[in-house]
Amino acid sequence: MGEVLVITSGKGGVGKTTTTANIGTGLAALGYKVVMVDTDIGLRNLDVVMGLENRIVYDIVDVISGNCNHKKALIKDKRQEELYLLPASQTRDKSAVTQEQMKELCQTLKNEFDYVLIDCPAGIEGGFKNAIAGADKAIVVTTPEVSAVRDADRIIGLLEANEIKNPKLIINRIRPDMVKRGDMMDIEDMIEILAIDLLGVVPEDEMIVVSTNKGEPAVMDKTSKAGQAYRNISLRITGEAVPLMHLESHTGIMSKLRKLIGF
Amino acid sequence: MLQILQKIFGVNSPTASKVVAKERLRLVLLHDRTSIPPHVLNSLKGDLITCISKYLDIDERNLDVSLTNTDDSVALVANIPILKVKQYL
C-alpha cells in the first residue's frame, strides 16, 4: 500500500508543479513506483513541465466520470521506467470532480503505486479541497516572501483542520546572497514563523527555467543545485536522513573575518 | 560606525529588510490565525446568550461580541448590557 502526498502552497507561482515534477522523477529514479496527479483542472501544467503534453489522450475527469479506466489514462514518463502522469482536464473546471471521487481515485492509485503525488491548484477553494481529500500527508511549498509565507500559514491551518497532520515544508527559490545581506528571510526565520518540520530547501537556480523549457525535470541534472536539493528531498521522503546541502559555493573572506572577531 | 561595520560584515541590522518582513509577518499571522468566520462568531454569540441568560437578564439586541486586534494581542470583547440580575434565595 502506497502513500498519497499532496503538494500545496496556497499562493500561486511558488513552485508546486516544479516540485511535484522533480520529486516524482526523483522518487522514480530511486526505484519507486510513482504516479503524479495534476488536479489543477482547467489550468493544467504538470504535463508541459514533464514534457508529456503531446501524449495526452484521456485525463482525470475521464477517469473519474468513468469514461475510461485509469490505466488507460496514465501517461508513462519518457525517461523513468516506473513514473506515470495522470493529467488534469484543460476544458473543464474544478467542479467536475468531487471530494468523494478524489478519495476513491487516491485509494485506487495507492494500491498500485508506492507514491501518489497530488499537484494541488493555488487557492483554498474547491480545487484545494479536492486535492487534499485523499491525501495521507502534505508538503507545503513556500518562497521566502511575506505573501507566500502568509498563505503557507493559512494552508497549514486548513490542512490540520482537515486531519492532515504534520505537513512538511519546502522552502523554494532561496537566494543565499540575499539571505547573507539580510534582505531575505533565512531558513530559521521561516521555520520559526510557520512552526512545521522542514523537508528541504531549494536554491534559486536558472537551470529550473532551462529544464522547464525542455520539459526535463532538473532533478536529473547533476550540475544543478536545485536538482541536488530535489534529490535530497526525494531521499528524505523515503525516510533517509540527508543533511541540508550548503547553499553557498564558498565561504568568503568576510565571513571568516567575522568568525574571527566573533561578530 | 556600528552600522558600517554591520554592513561590511553582513550582520543584520534592525533595518535589514528581512527583519522588517519578519516583524510584519508576525503581526499579520497573529491576526490571521485568530480570525473567526462570521457564522462561527454568530454561533458563539448564541451560546454566550444562552449561558449568560441562566444567570442574568440581558439586552440581547444591544449585545456586541467581536474580536479586537491590538498591536500584539487579540482579545474577544463582549459588551453585554444587563437588564436585571436574577434574584436567588
Image (tube, rainbow, N blue to C red):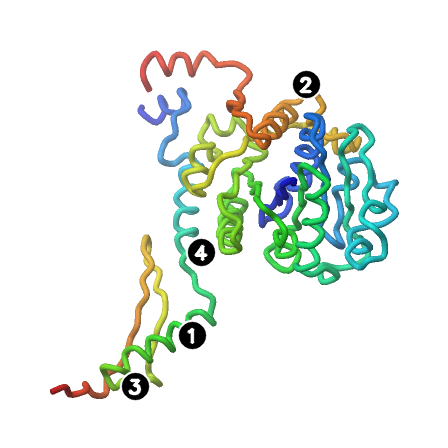
Mark linked to residue B42: 1
- Identify which amino acid the numbered label 1 is placed on: Asn
Answer whether labels 2 and 3 touch (C-beta < 8 Å): no
Horizontal side of residue B44 vs B88, given as left or right: right
- 10 Å crowding of disc 1: few (<14), some (14-19), many (20+): some
- 10 Å crowding of disc 4: few (<14), some (14-19), many (20+): some
| Residue wearing tag 2 | A223
Q: Quarter holding the N terminus of chain B?
A: top left
Camera-nearest label, 1 or 2: 1
Answer whether labels 4 and 2 touch (C-beta < 8 Å): no
- Mark 1: which secondary structure? helix
- 10 Å crowding of disc 2: few (<14), some (14-19), many (20+): few
Quick one: label 3 or label 4, which is nearer the N terminus? 4
Task: Name the residue nearer the viewer: A256 or A19.
Answer: A19
Quick one: label 1 or label 4, which is nearer the N terminus? 4
- Identify which amino acid the numbered label 2 is placed on: Thr
CA separation in Å, label 3 and label 4: 31 Å
Mark linked to residue A252: none
How many discs appear?
A: 4
| Residue wearing tag 3 | B59
- Chain bearing tag 4 is B
Task: Name the residue nearer the viewer: A155 or B67.
Answer: A155
Answer whether labels 1 and 3 touch (C-beta < 8 Å): no
Q: Residue A93's quadrant in the figure? A: bottom right
| Residue wearing tag 4 | B32
Quick one: label 1 or label 3, which is nearer the N terminus? 1
Q: Residue at x 43, y 55 (%)?
A: B33
